[in-house]
Image (spheres, grey):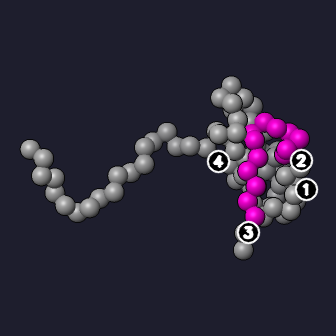
Amino acid sequence: MRRSWLFVPGVDTAAHERAARSGADVIVLELEDFTPPELRPRARELSREVFDRWRKAGAAAASSRRSKRPAPRARTGRKSTAP
């Protein structure tokens, strides 16, 4: 069971180290909301090393980024009545 999730800024290496020692079940490398756009390429470069470190500490490692595609629209099964 994964009970604790920790979200960590993408380029904050000190936070990466603290996360490895945190005991969290899942550690998420946040590549969008916590990382300024100009630093995102660097965050992606760090991700492989960071994930390896977190996995060695016993956590599941993941990254978070927004999809550029819009969310799918719900289908109701009704036909449009618009002309």
Q: Is residue 82 magenta?
A: no
Amino acid at dot 4? Ser
Q: Is residue 12 magenta?
A: yes
Q: Quadrant of residue 76?
A: bottom left
Residue named by callout 3: 3
Q: CA distance from mark 2 to mark 3?
A: 20 Å
The span picked out in magenta is 3-17
Disc 1 to disc 3: CB gap under 8 Å: no
Q: Is residue 2 above or below residue 28?
A: below
Q: Earlier in the sequence, mark 1 or mark 4?
A: 1
Q: CA distance from mark 1 to mark 2?
A: 7 Å
Residue appearing at x 19%, y 61% in the figure: 78
Residue named by callout 2: 17
Q: Quadrant of residue 57?
A: bottom right
Q: Residue furthest bottom?
A: 1
Mark 1 Cα-neighbour bin, 10 Å: few <14, some 14–19, many ≥20: some
Q: Which mark is residue 21?
A: 1
Quadrant of the drawing holding the N terminus = bottom right
Q: CA distance from mark 4 to mark 3?
A: 18 Å
Amino acid at dot 1? Arg
Mark 3 Cα-neighbour bin, 10 Å: few <14, some 14–19, many ≥20: few
Amino acid at dot 2? Glu
Q: Secondary structure at mark 4?
A: strand
Disc 4 to disc 2: CB gap under 8 Å: no
Say if residue 17 shows up in the picture: yes
Residue named by callout 4: 64
Q: CA distance from mark 4 to mark 2?
A: 18 Å
Residue 52: image location, x then y, percent: 82, 52
Residue 69: image location, x then y, percent: 45, 42
Q: Is residue 80 above or below residue 30?
A: below
Amino acid at dot 3? Arg
